[in-house]
Image (tube, rainbow, N blue to C red):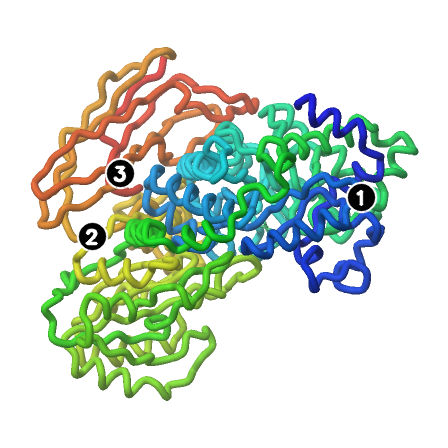
Amino acid sequence: MSKRTKEILSNMTLEQKIYHLEQLPTATFLTGGTYDIVTGPESKLKLKKDMIYDVGTTLNLVGAETMIDATSNYLNGSKYKIPLMIMQDVIHGHRTLYPINLGVAASFDRGLAKELAQMAAKEAALDGMSVTFAPMVDLVRDPRWGRVMESSGEDPYLNGEMAKATVEGYQGDMGKYNIAACVKHFAAYGAAEAGRDYNTVDISERTLREYYLPAYKSAVDAGVKMLMTAFNIVDGVPCVGNKHLVKDILRDEWGFDGVVISDYSAFEEQVTHGSCEDKKEAAYNAMMAGCDIEMVSSCYAEYLEELINEGKITMEQVDKSVLRILDLKEELGVLDNPYRSVDVEESKRVQLCPEHRALARRAAEESAVLLKNDNILPFSKDVSSVALIGPLGATGEIHGTWHCGGKASETISVFDGMKSILGDKVKYAQGCYAEYDSEDTSLLDEAVELAKNSQCVVLCLGEKQEYSGESYCRTDLELPQIQYKLLDRILEVNKNVAVVLFTGRPLAISRLDKTAPAILNMWMPGTEGGNACASLLFGDSVPSGKITMTFPRTLGQCPIYYNHYTTGRPKAQEDDEKFVRFTSCYLDVPNSPLYPFGYGLSYTSFEYSDLTLSNNTMNRTDTLVASVKVKNTGKYKAKEAVQLYIRDVKGSCVRPVKELKGFEKITLDVGEEKTVSFEITEQMLKYWNRDLEFVAEKGEFQVFIGKDSTCKPFASFMLV
Ligand code: BGC
């Protein structure tokens, strides 16, 4: 809190303070804006017309010119002239889009995640943005939920590492090319029942703390400036008005004193949830929990004054919230220059510039996961003819939802990418439509004919980009039947087929795994997706991504995740294929997933040897070292994500069968060997014990190092 912001605050009227806590869509302030606050969709907000130009913050605007227009209109209309702070969902890139976040996590590369956030921040800052509503760090276990694409997966440690890297990337030193980050959605939004968006979350305090909270905490520890509460309830109370979450845990326990914002209209939704009688109670609950900004509803604007007059809310509480916002504006330089870093010309030069495209391409290559390869890939560039087939083969709509300023017309399709490597040797046929319910077979014959007359086939299947993202949830995780029909028909005439998969979530593709000779999962790869895909298919780059969310064999296994508890009747792994009565299993499907957490193939092979642990006992102040030699025994220079897992064999509460505790991505030349070492400290062994204290309990811990989460323990130690 600075002298300057305190002074600004001391000159503010109560009404002005209250409106400073309101957030409206930027379209409100645009010349000829569509959001007419008086008669348009926002009129239901019941805001005072003469105060609209004095709300403190705004959201969702793209483009430097639009920013300048909105800001100057705002300043013209404003009575008090405190500059507006502009926020935007810069989720996986601003204009240059990189892969969806579930893809970036698969790179297992903290440095890459940071560089990508830096790039997005620069593009967004030059368009005048101050804050991004990212990173989204919700832990996810249910692939039905459409928002898994925004998350980094099912592991608390990896989510935390990605959160930290991303926050550092966006915020840097909060300079000209940086923006403030807003971690979301606090808390446990990813645990929505049945994977249906906005649905009930019912979670124990233990599960919340053990699995769901660590990533938000990592973002807070990394200095994130803002936090967004979630739509859902936790323990019966909507997060925005949840005192236990926001006040007790976030503010008091973690010491977070940055700005807290609600999600879109979530204040008012407390009434719909049925936890508040009316908007007044909604305002009261949110303020008592510690929420500063109300996103696009008007509970504070309508009722805060009344609540203060009645003595239910104090002026100090309101002042504190306003100060937090003013302080952030000051730190971002908005108070000195309402236009902040906006620069129409520089923005044009920087957005989609060759360096940004190159980084997006590298990210798409490193995010891609080779799920299966029966010696099919990489294809040789010397082939005489290649058939590119599939509804997702020649479209730029492979950048995923939350595409901000990115455009399909600026995105490289697989067809574009392949043409730049192979020229006219590649021919395209669509084969079928991408809609999940399409039964139209009219395009099949042409595609089969093309496959028949080509040396190899690249078949682009999967989900359209609008099938994942907010509110895009699904109950069927299979590929559409028409896509299987296309594959089967093609395999009848040509066996040299690689399937390229586009998806925003883990799919249940056991049938594809059985039939397709090779599967390369590109997720939604972003602006440079097609170039990255072509490089990978034709051996200019080597896949190194590993999935961070388990792919089930069938939806019936969900939720399925690697770091589960053992149960009292576990089924032995060697019996996985069998039904064993009275053990925890299914009659019809093994317990193991189709592809486990951490899994991904390469064109080369790696040999893990000489696994060692520096000691078999550990005192509280000791650091043990676990190390392994990894050798590239194949024919391609490649990267490998080496993973460390630990199991706490016995605790006062049950412990997961294993937990990721470290990872390192290394590059190895052909024949090269490197030693990878991980330090193990007491801190890494802590968990929430029976009394909900965060402690490491003495006893045996097993250590695993390997290429995915199925690796076996190689040593154990006693914590004394
Ligand atoms: C989403 C948030 C997003 C906000 C603003 C909401 O619907 O849940 O993640 O930041 O809209 O666009």
Indicate the amino acid at tag 1.
Answer: Lys
- Point out which mark residue 79 bears: 1
- Which circle's residue, 1 or 2, is located before the other in the chain? 1
Q: Residue drawn 18% across and 62% down?
A: 538
Q: Residue drawn 57% across and 56% down?
A: 65
- Which circle's residue, 1 or 3, is located before the other in the chain? 1
Label 1 C-beta lies within 8 Å of the nearest ligand 1 atom: no
- Point out which mark residue 542 bears: 2
Direction from residue 49 to residue 92 in the image, left or right: left
Where residue 35 sits in the image (x, y, percent)? Answer: 71, 61
Q: Residue drawn 32% across and 22% down?
A: 680
Asked if residue 360 shows in the view, the reply is yes
Query: Is 553 or 620 nearer to us in this picture?
Result: 620
Q: Name the image quarter holding residue 716.
A: top left
Residue mark closest to the camera, 1 vs 2: 1
Indicate the amino acid at tag 3.
Answer: Lys
Q: Name the image quarter holding residue 32.
A: bottom right
Furthest-front residue in this view: 345
Residue placed under numbered mark 3 in the picture:
665
- Which circle's residue, 3 or 2, is located before the other in the chain? 2
Query: Is 638 or 629 nearer to us in this picture?
Result: 638
Q: Quadrant of the N terminus?
A: top right
